[in-house]
Amino acid sequence: MSDIILRMEGITKQFGSNVANNSVNFDVYKGEVHTLLGENGAGKSTLMKVLYGIHQPDEGKIYVDGAEVTINSPREAVNYGIGMVHQHFMLASNLTALENIVLGMPTSRPPFLELNEAKVELGKIAAEYDLHVDLTIPVWQLPVGAQQRVEILKVLFRKANILILDEPTAVLTPPEVEQLYKVIDQLKAQGKSVIFISHKLNEVKKVSDRITVLRHGQVTGTISSKEANPNNLAKMMVGRAISLARKQPAVTDASSDKVLEIKDVTCLGDKGVTALNNISLEVRRGEILGVAGVDGNGQRELAECIAGIRPVTEGSISINGQTVTGVVKDPRIMGYIPEDRRRTGLVLDFSIAENLVLKTISEPQYKKFGYFINWGTVYKHARQAIKEFDIRTSGPEAPARHLSGGNQQRVVLSRELEKKPAFILASQATRGLDVGAIENVQDLLREQRNQGAAILYISTELTEVMSISDRIIVMSKGEIMGEVTPDPSNLPQIGEMMMGLRTSEQEGRANNEQLES
Amino acid sequence: MNSWSLKGALQKAKDIIVGPIIAIALALLLAGILIYFSGYEPLAAYGALFKGSVGNINSLAVTGVRMTPLLLGGLAVAMSFSCGVSNIGIEGQLYLGAVGATIVGLMPLPVPQWLHLLLVLAAGFVFGALWATVPGYLYAYKGVNEVVLTLMLNYVAIYLVSYLTNTVYGPLGEKGASYSQSPELVSTARLPILLKGSSLHVGLLVGIVLAIALYIFMNHTSSGFRLRMVGFNPHAAEYAGIPMERTRMQIMLLSGGLAGIAGASEVAGLFHRLYANFSPGYGFDAIAVSLLAGNNPLAVILSSAFYGALRAGATRMQQVIGIEVSIVFIIQAFTILFVTAGTVLSHRPSVIKKLFRFSKKSPAEGRG
Ligand SMILES: Nc1ncnc2c1ncn2[C@@H]1O[C@H](COP(=O)(O)OP(=O)(O)O)[C@@H](O)[C@H]1O
Ligand SMILES: [Mg+2]
C-alpha cells in the first residue's frame, strides 16, 4: 500500500472569475480509500471531473502510475483505469441495469449489445464485491441504493482501478450506507483505490485511510484517518469550530397560544393509499416541534397537507385559528421551507432578486405607476437580503440555478422568514446541505422561535431533530407513534417508535409481535 | 435606468440574438450549397432574394405585408410557449379570429372608423380566444394533453371557414361568387394602408405595438411575473399559491386571442374579405418564428421580419433566377434545426467547448 497510483499536482480550474480549484495537490495509493471532504461548493466535484476528463485543468499535471497523462474525455479516463460514480446518477431509467452497464461498450456484433456474456461476467463481479442487484428490471424500479450499486458495477465492468464516488451517501438511508461501506471495504481488499467524496464530517473517519479537506477550492490539509476527529475536520472544512449541540431552550410553556392545530387528519398519498392516518398535533408560539421518522412514513404528505397542496380527506388543519383550505399566501402567517428547493422552493431560471419576491411581488413597495414592477426596489431588496443572509453570489441578477445548494437554501429562507411568520414549516430543510449550512439554517430557525414563531421541523436526520426541537414526535406508517423530549436518554425509545412501536403500548405490542412472527 | 439593468439588458439582448444569427448564417450556407448543386449560382440567388425583400421601398412593403401575420401569430406562440403551454392551435384560432373580424366588418355600424376597426380587432381576439376555450378547459382543468387538442382543432377550424364561406349555403358566403369567400367588408372596417400604392397596412403597426405591450406585460407587471413563474417552474408556482388551473386557462385564452388578431388583421388589412383556406399555414410558421426568437416578444419582431423577407424575396428569386419558392421553406427548416441544436448544445457546454477546441486546433478557418 505504498505505491502511489495517482497524483494530481497543482491543479487549477477556473469558471469565469470563479476559482473552483486552486493549485490542488492530491494523490492516491493503491488499495487506499482517500476521502475528499469539503463543504458544498468547495470544488470536490470539479477536481474529480478534471480527473475524469470532463473538465480540462487550466494548470497542473496528472500522473497515473508515475507517468504524466492528459485526460481529454471520460473515455480516456476509463482507459487509464479511472471510473466515476457521479453525484447525480447518470442511468437511463427505462433500460434495465444490465443494458445500462453494457451501453457504450464495444460489441462484436453491432448494433446489438452483448448482454449474455456481460451477464456472466457481471455475476462474477457482483459475487466478488457483494454488489447484489437485479440486473433484469428497468432501473427506475430499483431503490436508490441499488441504482448506486449498478453505477459501481458499471465502473468495475470497465475494469477501473481507481473508483471515484461523488457524495455516494447523500442519497442513501442508514442501512444502505452500511452496505456501501462494506462494498468499499471489499474494493479495498481487492487492491482497488477509492476516492470517496463527502461533505459530512461524521461519516468519513470510519471509511477512509486518509482525508484531504478542500475549502474554497484550496487544500487545507491531508491527514490520516487516525489523526482525524470531528473537531479538527470541522476547523479545516469551515475555518472555525462548529457545533450542532442544543442551544437556548424554548421560551414557551403549556399556556402559550396554539398556532398550528391539526385535528384527526387523514389523507391519501400519490398512489391513492392512506398516507396519513388520523394525525393530531399542535405547535405553540415560541416552540419547535420536531418530527422524526424514517423517510417515506408520511412526513412529506403531512407537510403538503399543511402547505395546502394536498387535500385532506378527514379532519382539519388550522393556523392561527384559520382553517387551511389552500395554499396560505400570506407570508406573515406562514413560512414554508420545502424539502426540494430546486423543484418547489425556487424558480431556477429566475434571478435571485426575482426568487426573493415570488410571493410578495404584488406588494406596493415593488410597484410603480400602479401597475408596473419597480425593479429598482426589487433589486434593492435583493441586495439587502444577500448581505443579511450572506448569500454568496455574483449579484442579485444571477440565476438561482448558478448558486450552490446552501446558498439556494439561504434564498428560500430569506424569502420565507422575511415577514416573521407566525408559523414556519421546515420540511427536510437541510437535505443535501453541509454542516456549516445546516448550522446556519438551524440558527435562523432558533432565532425565529425565540421571537415567538411556532415551528414544525420535519427531518429524517435524527441528530438534527434532537438538536433543534423542544418536543419531538415520531412518525411511522402515517401515524404518530408518540411524543418525547429531546433528551439523549430517550434515543432507544425513539428508535423503537421509528420502527413502528407506540409509546404506550411498546411492551405489549413488542410481545405480541414476537408471538405472531 | 440603473447601470445594472442597462448592462443586464444588453447582455440579455446579446444572449438572445447571437444564437439565431449563427443559425441563420449556417442555414443560408447549407441552402446555398443546395442551390449550387441544383445548378444555380447561390450568390445571384441570394442577391435576388435580398433585392426582392429589402432592395427598395416596394419590396420592403411586401416584406412588411408577409411579416404581419407571422408577427401576430408569433406573439401568440411566444405567449403560450414562454408560459409552458404548448398551444399548437394558432392556425385554427387565426381562422376563427378572421371569422369574428368578418362578422363585425360586414356590419355597417354608425361609428367612426377607428372605433369600427377596434371592434373588428376585438372580435378577432374574442373569436380566437373562444376557439381556444374548449382545449384550454380540458387542458387546464382536466389535464388532457394540449398539443393534441389544439392541433386537431386546426383542421376543424379550416373546414368550418370553408363551410361558412361556401357560396351556395355558407352563412357568410358571397352568393354566386366563383371562389368560397365572403362579401367585401364595409369601408370603415378596412385597416388603412401605410404606404400608398402598396398593400402594407396598419396590421404591421398593430403587431409591433402588441409585441412591445406583451414584452412589457411579461417583464414589467406582476401578472406577467406570475405567468413566467408558471412557465419556468409550475411546481414552485403552485407552492407560491398561484391557482394553476385558472392561470393555464388564461394563458391559453390570451394566446388564442392574439392568434385571432392575426386572422383579423389579414381580413381587415389585406383581403378585405374572408376566403376559404386564406392562410398558407401562418399558424404553423408562427411556431418557427417564435422558436427562432426564443419566445421573446421583441425578438419575434425581428424573426418575423426575417421570415417575411424570405417569403417576399422568394418570388423575385423565382422570377429572376428560376429557383423554386420552396427553397425558402428549406431555409426556414434549417434555421429551426440549428436554433434547436444550439439550444441543446448550450445545455451541454462541454460539447461546444470541444467543437471550439477542435476548430482552434484545425488549420481550416473557423465558421460564422
Ligand atoms: N460547469 C460549471 N460552470 C461554472 N461554475 C461551476 C461549474 N461547476 C462548478 N462550478 C462552480 O465551482 C465551484 C465548485 O463546485 P463543485 O466542484 O461542484 O463543488 P462541490 O462538489 O465541492 O460541492 C462552485 O462555486 C460552483 O458554483
Ligand atoms: Mg459536488
Image: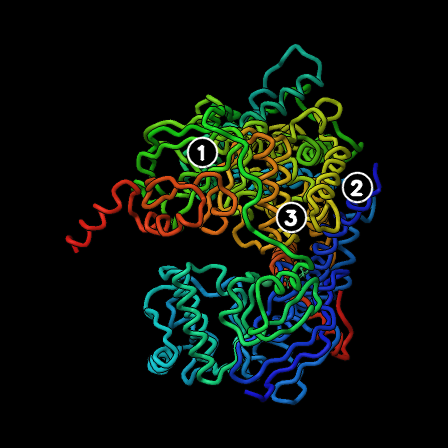
Q: Which of marks 2 and 3 is in front?
A: 3
Q: What crowding class fits label 1: few (fewer than 14 Cα within 10 Å), some (14-19), or many (20 or more)? A: many
Viewer-side residue, A120 vs B102: A120
* Farthest front residue in view: A489
Q: Which residue is drawn at 41% across and 65% down?
A: A147
Label 1: state its secondary structure: helix
Q: Quick check: is the Cβ at mark 1 less than 8 Å away from ligand 1?
A: no
Q: Are marks 2 and 3 on the same chain?
A: no
Q: Which mark is residue A306?
A: 1
Look at the numbered discs 1 and 3 and tell me whether their residues touch, using CB distance below 8 Å.
no
Is residue A340 found left or right of A410 in the rendered image? left
- Residue A206 horizontal/vertical position (percent): 49, 70
Label 3: chain? A
Q: Which of marks 2 and 1 is in front?
A: 1
Label 2: chain? B
- Residue A207 horizontal/vertical position (percent): 49, 71
Identify the residue position indicated by label 3 in the image: A400
Identified by mark 2, the residue type is Ser
Identified by mark 1, the residue type is Ile
- Separation (CA) of disc 2 from disc 1: 39 Å
- Residue A237 horizontal/vertical position (percent): 65, 62
Identify the residue position indicated by label 2 in the image: B5
* Farthest top residue in view: B110
